[in-house]
Image (tube, helix red, strand yellow):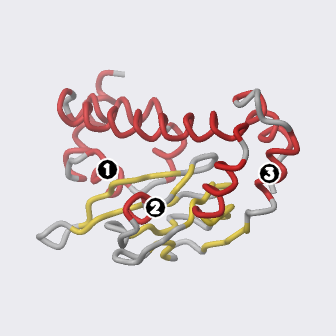
Amino acid sequence: MLELSKIQRYLSLFTNLSLSDILHLFTLVKERKLKAGEIYIHEGVVHKKVAYIKKGIVRGFMMKSNGEEATMVLRSEDEFVASYHSLLHKTGSKATYHALEDCVLLEIEYDKLMETIDKNPHYHSGRKFFLSNIAEDLLNRLEGFILLTPEERYDVFLKKNTTLAKRVPDKYIASYLGITPVSLSRIRARKSKRS
């Protein structure tokens, strides 16, 4: 499933979890492979699973009224992907999620996960950790769109996602930043002149 180094990392993050607690979660996990371009979650479908990305990149996008795709989510190794609308509201996903590269996901049924967490208080700190990370990510993204220029948003993206910047097509990065591919090219040209 996971390499020992990654299991040790999670044990260090959640000191109240034992190795047996983590291994118990793996009994609920199923591995799923996606080919590049394959859709993982379809818009409008209730998807009640959470997936840890062991390998690859998953992109989530919504359709604008003009028919253009707006990239909402870019997730890669050691990150989680899910349709939060499906999990929290039991409604169809508002976005489509697809593999940008061949992916290996470790999937778990959300209801089984919540049942396990509710039965064992050792898992509660993990739940708080992941929920606070989701909230922080959303707030940082919102603040970035309100307070930062497109170039500053690109700088933040590069700092947080060095490898993604090399693996994701420019049109998706531009969409994620809320700019056009032409604007992204201009930003890169200005930055290269300064270096």
Q: Is residue 68 left or right of residue 112?
A: left
Crowd tier of the residue under label 3, counting other residues whose Cα lies within 10 Å: few below 14, some 14–19, many 20 or above: few
Could you say which quadrant of the image residue 102 lies in? Answer: bottom right
How far apart, in angstroms, are the residues tagged by discs 1 and 2?
Answer: 23 Å
Identity of the residue drawn at 87% across and 40% down: 19
Q: How many marks?
A: 3
Mark number displayed over residue 87? 2
Label 2 SS: helix
Identity of the residue drawn at 55% across and 40% down: 130
Q: Position of residue 194 (x, y in %)?
A: 30, 21
Question: Which amino acid type is shown beneath numbered disc 2?
Answer: Leu
Compare marks 2 and 3 and give the one earlier in the sequence: 3
For the C terminus, the image quarter is top left
Q: Nearer the viewer, residue 167 or 90?
A: 90
Question: Which amino acid type is shown beneath numbered disc 1?
Answer: Tyr
Mark number displayed over residue 161? none
Q: Is residue 159 left or right of residue 52?
A: left
> Which residue, given by chain and number where applicable, does mark 3 sit on?
2
Compare marks 1 and 2 and give the one earlier in the sequence: 2
Label 3 SS: loop
> Which residue, given by chain and number where applicable, does mark 1 sit on?
176
Q: Are marks 1 and 2 in contact (CB under 8 Å)?
A: no
Relative to 156, say whether 131 is above or below: below
Question: Which amino acid type is shown beneath numbered disc 3?
Answer: Leu
Q: Position of residue 7 (x, y in %)?
A: 80, 41
Q: Nearer the viewer, residue 186 or 114?
A: 114
Crowd tier of the residue under label 2, counting other residues whose Cα lies within 10 Å: few below 14, some 14–19, many 20 or above: some
Identify the residue at the far front of this view. 119
